[in-house]
Image (cartoon, grey):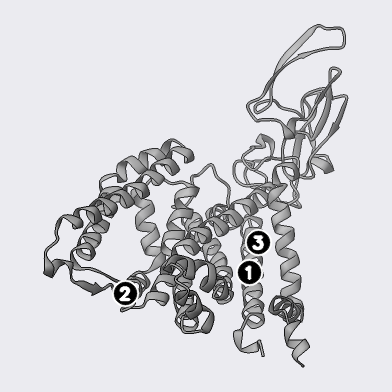
Amino acid sequence: MQNTNENFSFKKYAWAQFKKNKIALVCLYLLFALVILAFFAPYIANERPLYAEYEGNTLYPAFANETRTDSIYNTEGEFVQVLQYDIADWRQLDLESVVWAPIPYSPGGMDRYNRDYASPSGEQRFKNSEGEIVDIPSKFRHKLGTDGIGRDLASGLIHGTRISLMVGLVSMGIASLIGIILGAMAGFFGDTKLKMPRIKYWLTLFGAFMGLFYAFGQRKYVLAEAFGESISSGMLQMFISFVLIFVIIYFFRQISKLFQFRFLQKETNVPIDTFVSRGIELLNSIPRLLLIITITAVVDRSIWIIMIIIGVTGWTGIARFTRAEFLRIRSLEFVQAAESLGFSSVRTIFKHALPNALAPVFVSIAFGIASAILIESGLSFLGIGVPDDVVTWGSLLNLGRQNLEAWWLIIYPGMAIFLTITIYNMIAEASRDALDPRLKS
């Protein structure tokens, strides 16, 4: 019996429990398929060929930069034309050999001959290399139809998979970072374990308030303009804002050393648990979708802005799970042993306690990813999410709302959202059952 306990691996046990849920296991495989689909989206749905032979030149347009420009010479060395990849009509070129993508359309490409909501099973037209308008060949047919300006729905769904998965992962990555840190501190220190001189405590709070006010209040127009220019500029300004917060807090903490009065130097408890708990209650009391709509109305529309907002407003559930786990394990022997050996609180929290408290947090993250995808789809459906030139499942649903007769713009994006949310929820449900600490025995 002792040998059995020594060989016990909770990871293997949890995986064995997870595999017993056949539906969740199928959902896990489907999630892997979605990830592969999102990763290879530019090569699955692209109006540029994967491979082409043109005037004796071997080209790989789908793998090249969109702004690439080549000077084409024939086999005799004579100049033919300047080929600009992003505006070239590859279907009209006299290609000697060509391999098209499975979906030969880009999400933003407009087919002028199949505008006004071409039905998947209806008549579709095509302009051949001789300039004649004919019935569309099978390989160029819009399998799932088009929208009002001729954009292919299948291509939009495939590239929308990348957007949706990226929204879920990035936003919950931000939420996880905030929630785990705050929840760990609240659960480990509580209201009485962390002590600080009164003046240092007061000036730290004042510095945090001033830092937030200056970094995001006074600099809100700088941040909005930076995100309007480019994502890199916006992220740089966001990083500068966070640096300013820490610099201002550090400045006020250093000022506290100048006040050496007896009353001000007396130590007091820092109620971290109270601060975090009241912050969670305050954020949960505000309708999340309404808060996100309010923020997006102030700043320019950007997919990265949406992800940051969802992440900053979605950490409360993760923080509560982390706090609850730390309240449970902070009295266990290995945590007390780390403290008795003189390890710092940071090392005790992140190296010893946190790895043993993450199991329930992963379940919350999985549910959070599904929630983030649903929120982004809802914002795009309302027309206040991502920019108009970015194709997402929610924006495709919005196009279907404008013309209810185009049923394919409602059915297929709706099914994509439903299946993705269901996949994440089923995986989260099975993970919760497999990772339940009460099952360890």
- Residue 116 percent coordinates (x, y): 62, 44
**In this picture, residue 196 sits left or right of residue 387:** left
> Who is closer to the viewer here, 73 or 121?
73
* Residue at point 44%, 65% (across, down): 346
Instruction: Check disc 3: other Cα within 10 Å, few if <14, some if 14-19, many if 20+.
Output: some
Q: Which amino acid, by three-letter code, is at mark 1?
A: Tyr
Local secondary structure at mark 3: helix
Question: In which image quadrant can residue 67 be found?
Answer: top right
Residue pointed to by mark 3: 416
Q: CA distance from mark 2 to mark 1?
A: 29 Å
- Residue 294 percent coordinates (x, y): 34, 57
Residue pointed to by mark 1: 424
Q: Looking at the image, is mark 3 or mark 1 nearer the viewer?
A: 1
Instruction: Check disc 2: other Cα within 10 Å, few if <14, some if 14-19, many if 20+.
Output: few
**In this picture, residue 337 sits left or right of residue 1:** left
Q: Are the residues flagged by discs 3 and 2 in contact, CB closer than 8 Å?
A: no
* Residue at point 80%, 29% (across, down): 128
- Residue 66 percent coordinates (x, y): 65, 30
Residue 172 in the image: above or below residue 399: below
* Residue at point 40%, 66% (across, down): 288
Kindly tell me whether residue 314 is visible in this rendering.
no
Local secondary structure at mark 1: helix
Instruction: Check disc 1: other Cα within 10 Å, few if <14, some if 14-19, many if 20+.
Output: many
**In this picture, residue 100 sits left or right of residue 68:** right
> Who is closer to the viewer here, 426 or 193?
193
**In this picture, residue 65 sits left or right of residue 203:** right
Q: Which amino acid, by three-letter code, is at mark 2?
A: Arg
> Who is closer to the viewer here, 332 or 388?
332
The disc at residue 278 is: 2
Quarter of the image with the C terminus is bottom right
